[in-house]
Amino acid sequence: MKKKLMMVAVLLGALSLGACVDNDESASVTAVRNAKAEQLKGLAALANAQAEATKITAEAEAALKNARAEYQKEMTEEAKQKFAVKIEQIKAEAEKAIAAAKLQAAQDQQSLLDLADKRLRGLYASYKFALGDLVQLNNDKIELVADIASAEESLIPFTTQKQIAIDRLQRKIENEKFKIETYAKYEGVNKTELEQKATVLYKDYQKAGDVVSQKNAAQQEAQAAYAPNPFYYYGDKVTLKTVKAAGELRNNYYIAAYSPITETNTLLAGDYSIDYYTLNAKGVESTKQVLNNSVKYYENLIGTDKDKADQNGSYYAKIAYYTAQKAEILKADPDADVSWYDNQISQMNANITSDKIELKKAQDRVTEFNVLVAAFSGDDLKAYDAAVAELKTLAVALDKADKELQAARDAQNKALSEWQIAFTLAGQNNVDNLVETCKNNIAGWESEIYGYEKEVTDKETLIQQQKAELETLNTQIEAQTAIVNNWKAQIEAAIEAQK
């Protein structure tokens, strides 16, 4: 296109040498050319939102894949927790980047609208409307892919994961309902009034973005304050004796039919929960029995120097037996070879020395076990419960910050939708098709919610439902991309056709 414009300029220059063309005409041609260039430049900037959303989505998916691979290398509880935290970080970073891309696109659209005539303004509005939907679909995909990874690795309880999926769809339904209400609100309004209203709505959208930034900062601060690391016994910041004891008992004393501790997932607030550790009476008693039996085994094996001679008895009993046998033989024949008996006695003494070490270890295990069990009572337990109560307070604050951030984002999306709708209706008053699209979207998402509520009963069906939702979403992204590209092509053609 640049080559074509250059050829036009050259041709006009040549004609000006052989004919009298007034300066007004030349200025007019130059103005048109410059206007086209500015509009194409603005259109390219606006189209960048599409490329940016695709890029952000791809990078987020790659980051999730890498984080999951890192977790699967170890498959430990510590790695699992790190993966859960990483998922939330990836989602937050992607959402922030998507929001920035949407804001930039909104600014680019406003610049284009300032340059365009009425015919192009309608095309720009329709294009941006479709582009906004595409960007949002990419944002939804990031969230859904992250949730699938979370569900597959059981990072949070199944019931919580299921509710998150339902809430996500419910927010989308509410946004479509808001669009329908806004269509009804502005349908039939004078186009000039709509354009004037749109200018005000754009400022409202910018203000809503400022609120999102503020709420995002507050949420990050609350997230930093809520650091449950000391409550996970496999972490590197454990300070609570009860938590340390839970880790030792689980990792080093699960030696009987039952674990000596029970881990109960305890809800703190919203989606935030921790495993609360308590003693398992059966596990404690069975472990004690195993440990005490080990002590008795070595005690019986070693015996004492007062044990009676017995070839099949303790080490000391065998020493007494072999000593007596040796004496009998030497009594009968002082020159007899009794080296075998000497070797047996020497071996028994060596066994006593080595197994006394094992006995000490077994006794120490009993002592250590009792100390660990004691950490679940008295001041240690009080300190643990007090810390959990404090963490719950922080979780409530974080949940509140999460909700306020989500509310701010919802308000920003509504402001964006209302601004877009005002421009759309300024270009066309027949909104039946747009309303019908909203209704179809609502029906589809309500059907998905019904599936989650009635058919999803376990982790496997949840993942199956989420993957079906992802497949539908990928189809929507593909279709929406085609719509966006079509609007862009129409705008390019309209810009080129300007005279």
Image (cartoon, grey):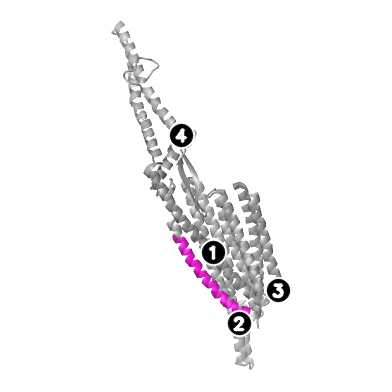
Q: Which mark is residue 343?
A: none
Q: Which of these two is toward me, 187 or 124?
A: 187
Mark closer to the observer (2, 1): 1
Q: Which residue is mark 1?
A: 407
Name the amino acid, label 2: Arg
Which secondary structure lies at badge 2? helix
Say few, some or many: other residues with alpha carbon within 10 Å of mark 1 (under 14 / 14 to 19 / 20 or more): some
Image coordinates of residue 318 in percent, x first then y, are 36, 17
Name the amino acid, label 1: Ala
Highlighted magenta segment, given as a residue range: 193-221
Image coordinates of residue 62 in percent, x first then y, are 54, 56
Which mark sits nearer the N-terminus, 2 or 3?
Answer: 2
Which secondary structure lies at badge 1? helix
Q: Are marks 3 and 1 in contact (CB under 8 Å)?
A: no
Q: Is residue 53 in view from this perspective?
A: yes
Q: Which residue is mark 4?
A: 255
465 horizontally vs 324: left or right: right
- Does residue 213 sit above or below 115 in this rendering? above
Name the amino acid, label 3: Asn
Q: Are marks 2 and 3 in contact (CB under 8 Å)?
A: no
Q: Quadrant of residue 107?
A: bottom right
Q: Which residue is mark 3?
A: 430
Which mark sits nearer the N-terminus, 3 or 4?
Answer: 4
Name the amino acid, label 4: Ile
Image coordinates of residue 364 in percent, x first then y, are 36, 33
